[in-house]
Amino acid sequence: MSLSPGAPEFADSHLIELLDGFGLAVKYVRAEGDTLYHDDGAGGEIGVLDLASGFGSLILGHHNPEIVAHAKQLLDEQVPVHAQFSGYSFGIDVAAALNRILRRELGTEEKFYGLFGNSGAEAVEIAIKHAEMDRGMKVAELLDGIEANLATAAEAVAGGAAPSAAALAALGVDTFDALAEEVRRRNAVTAARQPLFLALEGGFHGKLVSSIQLTYNADFRTPFKALAAQARFVPADRVDLAAKIVEEERVALLDVEVRAGAVELVERDFPVFAAFFAEPIMGEAGIKPLTADTARKLREVCDAVGVPLVADEIQSGMGRSGSFLASVHSGLRPDYVVLAKSLGGGIVKTGVVLVRESRYRKEFELLHTSTFGKDGFSSRVALKVLEMLEADDGAAYRRAAERGARARSAIEAVVAEFPDVLLEVRGQGLMLGVQFHDQSGSADELFREWSEHHVFAFALAGYLLHEKRIRIFSTASNPNTLRFEPSIFITDEQIDAFAAALRDVAQVVRDQDSAKLAR
Ligand code: F0G
């Protein structure tokens, strides 16, 4: 059986060469539920259990019949896909539906404003921009306050006050006017500094120009470091270290005060940091849910630093964890929530940032626009997805939890049989990761080589695809972890087929039979 479509010349040739080396370059021609089909070369098709699941964007499966019927109806009804800048948009309906859900799950009466984009990374970039605009407005307020204090001091000087010797010496000047000018000059330099972001080690927030700087994986991030503001990273289990980082990065604005007839210099903390980004279940890090302790410390740090806490629920949200937001499980209380992936129902591309009213800067609406953002078709599909998830008092969330528990216990049984090969299964609901032990110390040369090049899971994936007709990948930054993120419609048979295949491949690894994997 050859699954390879041959090396194309015009796109992805390098990637396809890599995938082809593991038998993973396949041209799929049809998709349905949790199954992808490729042709068998003889006019028929071969089904593959798809556990890669659109990288977690198929909570309702490929071509969910209800969503497809709805989409067809929208096209037949000639729903306006484009009616930009008309004030009203179907995006408002999506934001309204999301408000009901977020308020319920986060236990707040506060309103959330929706800002729409077309993908996960784009929604993250919108969150970055909004947070930076908020920071910039705070800086402007601080500078206005300093300007007012300089004016007060100037009046005092006209009335006989004078700058203190210490103030003049600190700035190397000898008159009040020179002091005021130097305060303004230094503050302008400080205000023009790039902001910093806080994010978690191992985190993934996208690959666009700014979002890639919040993504921990250095291979993805560092080539583009010069293009955008940087993040300082803290381990999820040591969020308290953020306080030390903030102290290290502390910068002050200069201000003046008139005390007992003397103009004195004082320092005001400059807002260096714009936001703290965290995934409630860290996906690319290897499917690692945040603990309640981490969630609490994140809130404390953000309150202390005065930055918004951004929950990147792009992968963990939309019901996958057993509730709409994975934040619910650890008690994370975000200021912004970012969603994408499954919001598009597996057929459209859309992303959104929800910002708490108390943190919202309405001026942003006039600055950020996108031709395709919140288009009518995507928004109406997204609305349908939300209706389906919320139907029957959240039956979809209960189903995600139940299917997830069923899958987890099947996988746990295999882990228990192969503790020498499998480290553990982690996650929540239908966002599970199965971690294999590192093979870099293996006696087998190929196993060692795959491990060193972080492609051990590619070899597992190639074997599972060819021998078991199961498509599954590893997480990007934890290459020994396979990610299991199927739809809520995954059946017992499919779960058992995966567990049996995992058992089989674990045996191959236990036997250190790289020839069998590579075949
Ligand atoms: N944030 C998280 C938590 C993600 O998992 C992803 C994508 C993004 C942001 C970016 O979204 O791809 O629509 O621009 N994760 C993919 C994955 C790459 O493999 O799960 P995007």
Image (cartoon, rainbow, N blue to C red):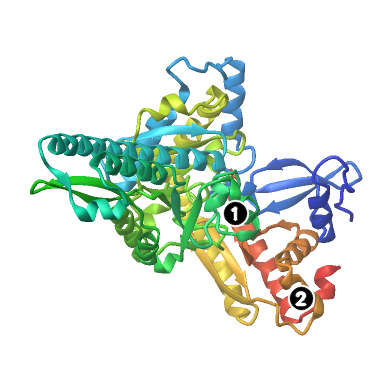
Instruction: Report the residue at 64% width, 44% height from top.
Output: 33
Where residue 477 sits: x, y (%)? 61, 62
In the picture, measured across the screen, residue 47 lies left or right of residue 473, that is right
**Disc 2 designates what residue?**
447
Distance of label 1 from label 2 (alpha carbons): 33 Å
The residue pinned by badge 1 equals 491
The amino acid on which the numbered mark 2 sits, given as a three-letter code, is Phe
Residue 157 placed where, x, y %? 15, 38
Which callout, 1 or 2, points at the residue further toward the start of the chain? 2
Helix, strand or loop for disc 1: loop
* Position of 503 relative to 66 (above/below): below
How many numbered circles are shown? 2
**Which quadrant, please, contains the C terminus?**
bottom right
Going by the picture, which residue comes out furthest to the bottom? 443
Image location of residue 360, percent across then percent down: 34, 35
Looking at the picture, which amino acid does disc 1 mark? Thr
For marks 1 and 2, give the one nearer the viewer: 2
Image position of 43 with respect to 333: above or below: above
